[in-house]
Image (spheres, rainbow, N blue to C red):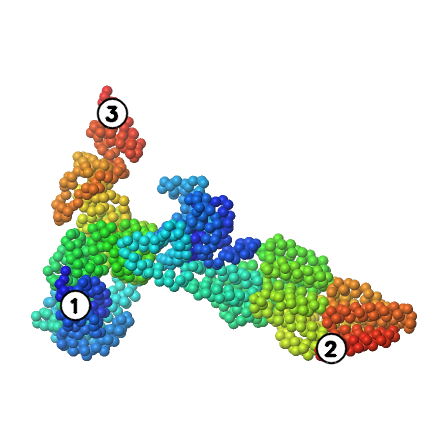
Amino acid sequence: MTRFLTPAKIGLLALIELYTDAVVPSSSTIPILSFIINQLLPCAYKAQPREPKSLRTLPFILDLESFEALLTSHPAAGGLPGRSLWDHFLRKLWEIDSLDALHEFFATRGNLLARNREEIKKDGELGIPPPSDDMILLSRTSPLGSFIRRAKVEYERLRFSDTLSLWVAFVEWREESRTYWAKRNGGLERWAGDRVLAEGQEEWGLEATEMLEHITYGALSKENSNQGGISTDDVEKLLEFQVEQMQKLGNRIPHEVKEQFKAVLEKNIIIPSLSHYLNFLDAWRAGDYPTSFDNLHRYFDYTMQSRDRLFYQYALMNLAVLQADFGCFDEAVAAMLETVSTARENKDMACLNFALNWLYHFGKAHPKIMKGTDSTNILGVEREGLAFLRIKAKETGMWTLWSSSLLSEAKLGMSNGESVATAFENILKSSQLIVEKNMKSMMGPQMAMHSSLWGRLGVAHLSRQYCDIFLTCHARYALFDDTLRFTTRVAHLLAERGRYDEAMEKLEGLDENSLRTWKSNQYWLKYRGILRLKRDLHRNNLSGADHLLSQLTQCNSSDTDTDLAYETNTLHIDYLIRRTNYGQALAKIEQMASEMKEEGDDLNLRIKLLTMKALLQDKAGRPQKGFSIAIRAASIAWRARLIPALWGAMGAIANILTSLSEFQASSQILVAIIPRALEYENCTLNAQLYSFLVDAYMGLAGQAESGSPTRKENLTRCLQFIDQAFDEYSTVEDIKGQCEMMAKKATIMRVVGDNVLANDYASAYLDLKKGLSVGA
Amino acid sequence: MLSQRDAAEMRANLQEAVVKCSERCLYQSAKWAAELLTSLSTTEDSIEPEDSQMTEVPAAAVPPIVVTGNVDPEEAQLEAKEINQYLLAKSFFDCREFDRCAAVFLPDTVLSGILSTAATKNPNASAPQGKGKSRGSAARTSAAPVATPKLSQKSLFLALYAKFMSGEKKKDEDSEMVMGPHDGGNAINKQLNVISRFLETWFLEHTNENGSVDGSQGWLEYLYGMVLAKDKNEAQAMHWLLKSVHLYQMNWSCWLEMASLIGRMEDLQQLGQRVPAHIFGFIFNIHTSLELYQSGPDLSARLDQLLSIFPTSPFILTCVALLAYHTKDFVTADAHFSNLLALHPHRLDSLDHYSNILYVMNLRPKLSFLAHLCSAVDKFRPESCVVIGNYYSLLSSHEKAVQYFRRALTLDRSCLSAWTLMGHEYVELKNTHAAIESYRRAVDVNRRDYRAWYGLGQTYEVLEMHAYALWYYKRAAGLRPWDGKMWMAVGSCLQKMGRDLEGIKALKRALQADSYYDAGVGSSFGSGGRERAAIMDPEILLQIAGMYERLEDEAEARSYMEMCVAQEEGAAENLDSSVINIHADSQSSEDDSRPQGGGDTGSGTGVTAATSKARMWLAKHAMRTGDYNRAMQLATELCQDGVEVEEAKALVREVRVRQEADGL
C-alpha cells in the first residue's frame, strides 16, 4: 500500500497527458477535464452534486471501466480515423511496458508543466529550445499541475519495494483491457506489457519465461489482493469525508459502509489516525461511553504533536463535549474550563470562542452545575457574556459563532419577555450573516428561532410553515438533531390539533439509520411516549397513561431535554387532575414553579404554569383563589407578548369572573379573545375558552328573567358554543370534555323544556361515559 | 568427458561432501557442492548403487542417513558415543544459537581452563614458523595439566565453528551503522583468539614426532587456517589451509579461503604445484584466475572442459559469464547470465555482477526487471540490494542508490561490490570524503578490486592530490595491465605532475592496450561513448603530443598531432602501431593477439574537440615553419568544421597577409 499513488492515479496522469497532447477534441474537453478535476479536488470544494446519479456511478477506487465509459464515446482529434480517445488512452497505458518505463513515465511528467524561469535558463544552457506556444502546458499551481508535481514527488520517495508493488498493481489493473487492446492491435503476444519477458522468451523459451513471470508477478495475481489499489491518501480522503459527514449530519456510519471501511482498513498497513476519530464518533453516537472514551484518547495520543501544533485544547474540548453528552457534567465543566485556559495560553481564539460559547449554553441548560463551579466570572453576566462572544466572533471571523450568539441573544430576550422587535432584529442579523456566508449548518437554529417566535406570537401556521420549510429545503445539509427537533415540533403542533396519527406518522417517517444515534433515539422514543401519553390522557385511558408516565418520569432526570421534561411534567399534572388528585397536582405545580424560579427559566413556561395553577383552583371549586395568579399571568404575558399564554390566562380570568357572577364582563372578554385564540389552532385551549363562554352565557341567561327573549337568546348561544366546544374536544379526542359538554347540553335542554332532546343528550352522555369507563 | 565409472565416483564423492559439510554446518559449501552434484550430466543414469566405490553414501535411491560414518575407527567410536549431544548441538547451530551450541561440547569452564594454560605457554609458542612451533617441547609439557577434552573431531569442529560464528555475530552486532561516525571497520571477532589458542593446543597434543597430525581429517585445519587468515596471519593461514585441502579435498569453503588469500597471479602459479590434483583444485584455479581478472583462451578452454562435465552448473556458468565480462564482451556476458537466469530463476548469487553488466550496457528495462526479480525472491539479500542500487544509480537517483548499497553492507559487511559501488555513488554526489572512505573499505575487504583502486585515484585527482592519485592508479594498472583506461589515468596524472617522459610512456601503453580491448567501458563509471578499439583515442594522442611539445620535441609532437587529426578519417590509414615504440615488458605476449579490427576501421571518430585542437596546433605550427599552404588548408578545414571559427578565420587572414607579403 502506497501513500498516494495507485494504478488509478497513473491512469489519471495518462489522461492528463492525453489532454495536453491535444488529441482531445474541443467538444470533449469539458467532460474529460471535469472527470479529472472531480478526482483531484478534495470533496470539500466540490459543488453539491446537481444530478446525484452521474456521480454515484463512479466507484471509490477508479477502475478501468470508469475510464472506458468516459472515453469511448469521444473520438480523437488526431491520429487514425475511427479511433476513440479510449484507444489513445490504452496506448499510453500499454506503452508502459516495464518497471523502467514506469519510471520513465513519471520522470517525463514534468514535461507537461510550464517551465519556470530557472528551468528555461537551464534548458537554454543545454540547448533545449523552449516549448512552442501552441503546446498545452499546465501551470504549476493549477489543480492538474499540482497533482502532477505531487505524483512526481510521491513517486520519488517510494522505496523500491513500494515501486514494485505499484508496478505489479498497475499491471494487474491494466489486465482488464487486454482483450480489447489485443483485438485492436490484431492480437497481442503472451507477454505484452512486459518488454523484458517478451524479449526474453526467444532466449529462454516459454517455460522458463513463465517461471520467471510467476516469480515476479505470479504470486500476486493469483491471490487477486487489491493491495496497490488503495493508497493512504485515498483512505484519508475517505475518512475525512466520513468524519465531515458525521459531524455535519450527526449520524452514525451505516452498517454496509462500516463493513466496507473495515475491509479497506484491514488491508492497509498504515492506519490513518483519523480512523480512530471515526470510531470515536461512531461509538459516541452509539452511546457506547467506554469505547468512545477509549477511542478519543487513542486518536489524540496519535495526533497530539503532529504538524507542530498542539492539539491538547481540542482533545479537552472533545472530551468535555463527550462527558456532557453522557451526563458527567462536573467532569465536562472541568474539562471545558481547562480547554478555555489552554486555548488562552496557546492563543487559539477559535477554540476559545467555541469553548466559551459551549460553556454559555451549558450554563443555560444546567445552571445548577455551573453554580457549583466558581466559573461564573468567566463570561460575567449573561448578556455581557453574549456580547463579548459576539464581538470576539466578529473579530476572529467565526461566522457560525457570531450568528449563534445573535440567536442566543434573541432567545435570551424572548425568554426574558423583552422586546419582540429586538428579538426580530437579532434574528434578522443572524439571517443575513447566514445567507451571506452560506452557512447551511446554521439554518436549523435560525429556522427554529423563527418558528418559536411566531409560535409565541400566536401565529401557529407561520410557525408550522417555518418547520416545513426547514424540513423540505434544509434538512439535507443540517444535523439530524435539528431535523428531529423540527419533526417533533410539527408533530406537537399536529397533536395540538388532535391529529395524533399524522403526528405519529411524521415521527415514524424519520430516517432509520439516523435514529441509530443513541441520543436522537432517546429523544425520539421519549417524544413518542409523550404523544401516546397525551392521547391516552385525552381518551381517559388512565391506567395506560400511568404506565407511560412512570416510564417517562423515570428517565426525567437532569440529562433530558428541558422541553421534554416540562412537557412530561405538565402531562403528569394533567394526569393527576384527571385522577382528581388535586392536592398532589398542586404540590407538583408548586415544585415546578420553585425550580423554575431558581433556574430563571423561560417566561412562557412560567406563565403556562401560573395559568395551570389558576385553573386547578377552579377545578378544586375555589376559582377565586386563583384570581391574583391569573391576573399576574395575564399581565406578564401581555408585557412579553406571549399571545397564546395570554389567551390562556385571560380564559382563566374570565372563568373567575364567571364564578364571581360577572357574566357580562366574562363574556365580553371571551368574545374578544376567542377569534384571536382560534388563530393559534390549539384545540384544547379553544374548547376550554368556548366552554367558559358557555358558562358565561349561561350565567347571563340565568340573570335574565325566565322565559324572556334574552334568556332564550343566551341559551341558544350556549347551545351553539357548546357544540363548538364539543367539536373542539372531539378533535383532540378529549372524552371527558365531550362528556361535560354533553351534560351541559342536556341540562340546557331540560331548562328549555325539551325533554326529548334532553333525554337524547343524556343517553349520548351515558354512551360517552361508558366509552370513558371502558377506556378507564 | 568423464567415464561412467568416474561420473559415479564423482557423484558419490559430491554426495558425501554435501552431507559432511552440512553435518559441520558449512552451509555454503554444502550448497555449492549440491549444486555441482545436480548439474553433473546424467546421460547414463542407470548406474547401480552397488557399482559405487564409496561405501558410506549410496549413490541413489537410498538417501544417506542423518550422519555419515567415519573411516577412522577411533573417531567413529567417539562419534557414536557423542551422537546425542552432537544432534543437540547441531540443532542449536541450525537455530543460530551459537554459544549454546558451543557449550554443548566445550562449556565455558573447560574452555577457559584450557586457555589459561595455553596462555602461559603462549610466549614460547609464538615462534613464527608453523612447524617449528610444534616442536616447542617446553610448551608440551606445560600443557599437560589440563588436557583438551576427548572429543571427536566432528564435534570439536562444530563447537569451535559455533564459537567462531558467535564471534562473527557479536562483531556484526557491535559494529556501528555502515559509514556512521564510529564505523571504522575495526570491530573484531573476539572469539578468534580463543579458537586459535584452542586449536594450537589441540594440534600440539596431536602432533607426532614427524610433525604430522595423527588421524586429522582436515576440518580443524581449515578452521585454524580461516582463523589465522582473519588475524591477517596469511602465510600461516595458507599453510594450514593447504594442509586441510590435502586431507580433504571436497571442502569448497576451504578453497575459497585460499582464493581470498591470493593477491597476484604469480602467487597462484606458485601455489599450483602445492595443491592436490583434484577437480576441486582445478575449479579453484579457474575461480581464482577469474578473481584476478585473468582472461584468455587457455582459461576459456579449461572452463569449457568443466562445462562438459557439469553442463548446467550455475557456478560454472557464472564463471563463463564473468570471463566474458572481464574481456569486456558484454553481449556474451549478458547472454550467459540471461541463460543462467532462465535455468535458475531463484538463484541470486552473483546477480550483482549481472547488474553491473546491464548497467554498463545501459539496458534499463532489463535491469529494472532484474531488480524486480531479485526483490521478489528475497529483498534482504546483499545481492538484491546491490542490483537495486545499481538500478537507481542508472536512473541517477544517487541518494537512493547509496541507501541500497548501505543496506547491502548492513546485511553483509564484506560485500565488496557494494563498497566500491557506493564509492562511485559518493563520487557522483560530490562527497569525496565518503567516497574515499568507502573505496578504502572496499580495498580493505579485497585488495584485488581494481575498480576501488581506480576510484580512489580518481577521487584524489578530483581533489588535485596527484601524487596520491598516481599511487592508486598504479595499483589499478598493476591489477589490469592490459586496460588502457588505467594507463591513461596514470599518464594524465603524471602529466599533471609534470613528469612528461613517464607520462608519455604510460599513455603509449594506454594506446596499445586500447587497441586490444574495447575502450572506455571498463567499469561502471560509464564515461561511455568512446569508439571501437581500432581507432586510437585522439585525446590520448593530443595529450602525448602536448607533452612532447613541452619537452620541446617538435618532431614527435607534430607526428602525434598528425596522428590525432588522422583519427577523424578512421583507422585505415593509421600509422602502424610499430610507430608507437613501447618499452618491451611482460605485456608484449598479449600484443600478439591484438586483433586488427578490419571491419570497422572505415569509420573514424569524426571531428572532435581533440582533433580540432590538434588541427589548430598544426596550423599554427605550419605558420611558424612557414608552410603557409598547409596552414591555409588546415585553417579552412577548421572553419568548415565550425570549431573555433573566430580563431581560424584570424589565422586565415594572417596567412593571406603573410602570403601577400611573401608574394610581394
The x and y percentages for residue B332 are 23, 52
Q: CA distance from mark 1 to mark 3?
A: 94 Å
* Residue type highlighted by circle 3: Arg
**Residue A131 position (above or below residue B70):** above
Give the foreground label among 1 and 2: 1
Residue A251 in sight in this render: yes
Label drawn at residue B658: 3
Q: How many marks?
A: 3
The x and y percentages for residue B342 are 27, 58
- Front-lying residue, B377 or B352: B377
Q: Chain of mark 1?
A: B
Residue B498 in sight in this render: no
The kind of secondary structure element at disc 3 is helix
Give the foreground label among 2 and 3: 2
Neighbor class of circle 3 (other Cα within 10 Å; few <14, some 14-19, many 20+) is: some
Residue A769 in the figure: left or right of residue B501: right
